[in-house]
Amino acid sequence: MPNVRQDARVPGAPYVDVRGLREELERRVDAEVRFDPGSRGAYSTDASNYRQVPIGVVVPRSVEAAVEAVAVCRELGAPVLSRGGGTSLAGQACNVAVVIDWSKHCNRLLSVDPVARTCAVEPGIVLDELNRQLAAYGLQFGPKPATHANCTLGGMIGNDSCGASAQGYGRTVDNVRRLEVLTYGGLRFWAGPLGPGGLRADLPGELGRLHSALAQLRDRHADEVRDRFPDIPRRVSGYSLDALLPEGEVDLARLLVGTEGTLVTVLRAELALVPLPAATALAVLAYPDLVAAARAVPPINEHRPIALEGFDAELVEFQRDKHLEPEVLGLLPPGGAYLMAQFAGDTPAEAAAQAEALVRTAGRATPSVVLRDRAHQRQLWQIREAGLGATAHVPGRPDTHPGWEDSAVAPERLADYLRDLKALLVESGYEQHSVYGHFGHGCVHARIPFDLRSDEGVRAFRRFLERAADLVAAYGGSLSGEHGDGQARGELLDRMFGPRLVRAFGELKAAFDPLDRMNPGKVVAPYALDADLRLLAPLTPPPGKQQFGYPHDGGSVVGAAARCVGVGKCRSHVGGVMCPSYRATGEEEHSTRGRARLLFELMRDDGTVREDGWRSPDVLRALDLCLACKGCKTDCPVNVDMAAYKAEFLSHHYAGRLRPRAHYAMGWLPVWLRAATRAPRVVNAVASAPLLSRGVKWAGGIAQQRTLPQVADERFSSWYARRGPRGDGPRGDGRRGEVLLWPDTFTDALAPQVGRAAVEVLEDAGFRVVLPEGPLCCGLTWVTTGQLDVARRVLRRAVDALRPHLDAGRPVVGLEPSCTAVFRADSAELFPDDPDVERLRQATVTLGELFAARAPEWRPPAAVGGRAVVQRHCHQYAVMGYDADAELLRRAGAEVEVLDAGCCGLAGDFGFTNGHYEVSQAVAEHALLPRLRRLGAEEQVLADGFSCRTQVEQSDVTARPRHAAELLAAAVRGAEGPPPSGASAGRDGLAADAVAVGALVLAGAAVARRLAR
């Protein structure tokens, strides 16, 4: 293992013995110690423009283990970087250091004092999880950054995070009472207010020496601090030397909050809490442009909102461009820019009254609306919080980046500053920028189309940042209003504070960290703002033919691998689908972001995993636990599609060599099922026999804990072929036209009752149902296992067979969500320029979408009744959406509860594959199974996905899940009519099956040969 220089800026700095460091950490520290290329690549960047590969990663299992890890690093001279959610935008969460990741194990709420309104926490606890636990006491931690679902308290303390709610509750620094900290030298103490005595040089040992150094620093620089520190709500840049001034209570916790891990390691924190607001209301006011909106901020602040946010109409349009159109968008008044002011009250009426008072004061000349409904407020907050991701990759526009994304001025000067900043952006060639922010506090967020891939673009980047720093300093503002300085703004601090205060920051650093081993090169003695840029490097894919088209990434897998901006929403623990494997493991490399980072490293000529190219075992390990759920395709702010990237990687990784047994068993499942339905009783007998089934599962790479699904006696397509008026055609009067019902593999061979139910419903509604001729498949199982050449041939055959139906204008109705998603999404990626594929994509609909478009007034003869508890298939959620299907159920009389429980955990072949069972079950236990165990007597489970139904059926939940078509068909039949039954396909028992089984292997081989041609 190569040596890594500790710190090239320190003359004579020794080299780190990396091998010895790793061995000593493994021997002494109760932690997961990772020095492999994959782990180092996953932690090589944050949400910033920078990339620095760490020496190694330590994931301590306790606070005391982290203390010991720092001790080992101290003894061997290794730099240390504490990391929480890894969402820093200025580069302070990546470094050539030993990264201590607190988020997996050191994430507990230690105590709560509801009377004093305080709590104690470990640094790895996520803000939303903390507030979820505090809600039982009617309390919360007040500051709430946009990354509240995944940011940790340790990271918030490191950056002095704020968020929109800081207007009402203050910054993080205003809500920290005490910190237990550890210096690199080993001094451990609780930092907080020092009381009347202030700093005490007479304290024994290292603590006394530290107090003495701080007192001397204060005495040398107090006047400069008073003169040069901006008196604005959001002065986050630099170190808080004002916490040492004698006119206030000296507070070492205030001094250390916002120091970005450059002075101490935070071990525990005691936090101040605030009551949860009983009710809120939002006043939304429209203006011609952002500058006009900013001029309205000072009078609005007089109404004392708890948050006052500004954004332009483009942010709303970006949401529409991504087909994210929540109901609230239709309520917004017309305008070029908006302010949203949130008010809190003890009752909804009180909160709304405050909002309405603001609207009256603004007058008729300012279009406005008051949002009282919590759902509408939540939707608008989601639009605002999605600003970073929504503006990063906009179709038809250059990608935007951080760098000057967090400046702040006094709210009274915001309008003029915004005017001049926008003029500077245009003058610098960055016309297509996006601006939004916490306008009530004068904090401006901006995404700017910097060219960070060329030398000239980087020179322009530097010139702009230097001029922007001078501009904000001229307005008496701060380089950072909540994101910190890190590497992006560290070298600009003298433009804001002057050289004397920058020297004072260096003296403070030397008092706490004289060896400069705590997150070196950030804030003090910083690395250059244009060094270590992650995009300024040769980016080329390893050799091999690209499989997908990547139309949204310039047609390049390199563009796709660079799409992730690191915001880390995939590390959230609740809400949406993304990312089930992270929720089960707590591992960075098993998050969407971690995988994206490794794929990016694979594309870099100097990447940590580049040496093995597509054969990289590190990338394979990270992608192995990807469930291919496609949740990231919707939940990720920049719409990363990790399922497609995984398939691309697998296609290259296994090119020309043997694959895992599961790829042959489950990747070729349509072939085997086609053969198995020739002798279903024999196949089912084998699958049910303990000894034989174990052998089958071993041979197929299937988890032994799984029960093999039963093959149907009669395929759905066979049943359809023999029914009809004369046994040879479709039924139904066809008054609404003909539809093609797609007989996917799962419905056809494993759940034909779903297909029969769908035919009943469609015909009752007046559709005439037709099926395609011959065995066809969408290619799903080959896609998910990365056998993309076969998938393309299978899909091509299906498209060709469906062409006459597309010519006839028939909708293609999908029942299995994953197969429907292939037609709606994957097909266009595999055939990006094929007009027939595009026609198929547009023609493919779900049952709910068909009825919404062509039979909106249809109701079944008998109302469904009761509550339907719906587990959406992940591909429904990510690709098609479920709103139309939920509405169809409601029109049929059901009370619909659509679960926000994430992925079921089975995810096609994933949960059946050997080695995945534990993760599969952990995903199901995250939210789905606990909810289903609480089902009431009048509740029934609906799950359109075969894998979702199978996961529930193979759990301890007593209720049996059904497809929505089955529920609707029951209502069509009413209380009496039995469902149409399948036949035994003309067999007279096991004797006939025994004859047929002899043909099973031959038939399977024949079908396989046909599909492979």
Image (cartoon, rainbow, N blue to C red):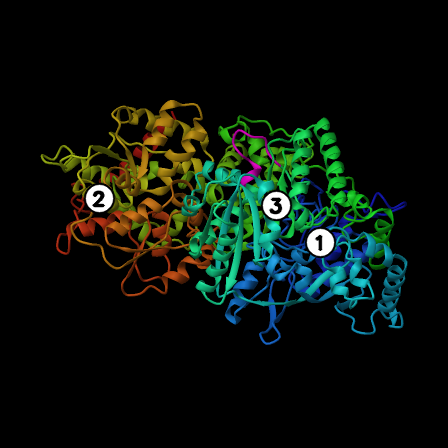
Q: Main secondary structure of the magenta part?
A: loop
Q: What element does badge 2 sit on?
A: loop
Instruction: Tell me how far mark 3 sits from mark 1, CA to CA.
Output: 17 Å
Q: What element does badge 1 sit on?
A: loop
Residue at x-position 25% and y-position 39%: 678
Camera-nearest label, 3 or 2:
3
Q: Label for residue 857?
A: 2
Magenta-drawn stretch contains 396? yes
Earlier residue among tags 2 and 1: 1
- Magenta residue span: 390-400
Instruction: Tell me how far mark 2 sits from mark 1, CA to CA.
Output: 59 Å
Give the position of the C terminus as an image quadrant: top left
Q: Position of residue 466 (x, y in %)?
A: 76, 37
Magenta-drawn stretch contains 222? no
Give the position of the N terminus as an image quadrant: top right
Q: Closer to the camera, 248 or 385?
A: 248
Q: Closer to the camera, 411 or 375?
A: 411
Viewer can see residue 509: no
Q: Which residue is mark 3?
A: 295
Task: Give the crowd class for mark 2: few <14, some 14-19, many >=20 residues within 10 Å.
Answer: few
Task: Give the crowd class for mark 3: few <14, some 14-19, many >=20 residues within 10 Å.
Answer: some
Earlier residue among tags 3 and 2: 3
Name, please, the residue furthest toward the left.
726
Q: Which residue is mark 1?
A: 232
Q: Position of residue 104 (x, y in %)?
A: 60, 58
**Residue type, label 1:** Ile
In this rendering, the answer to whether 838 lies above or below 195 is: above
Residue 161, picture quadrant: bottom right
Q: Position of residue 507 (x, y in %)?
A: 86, 55
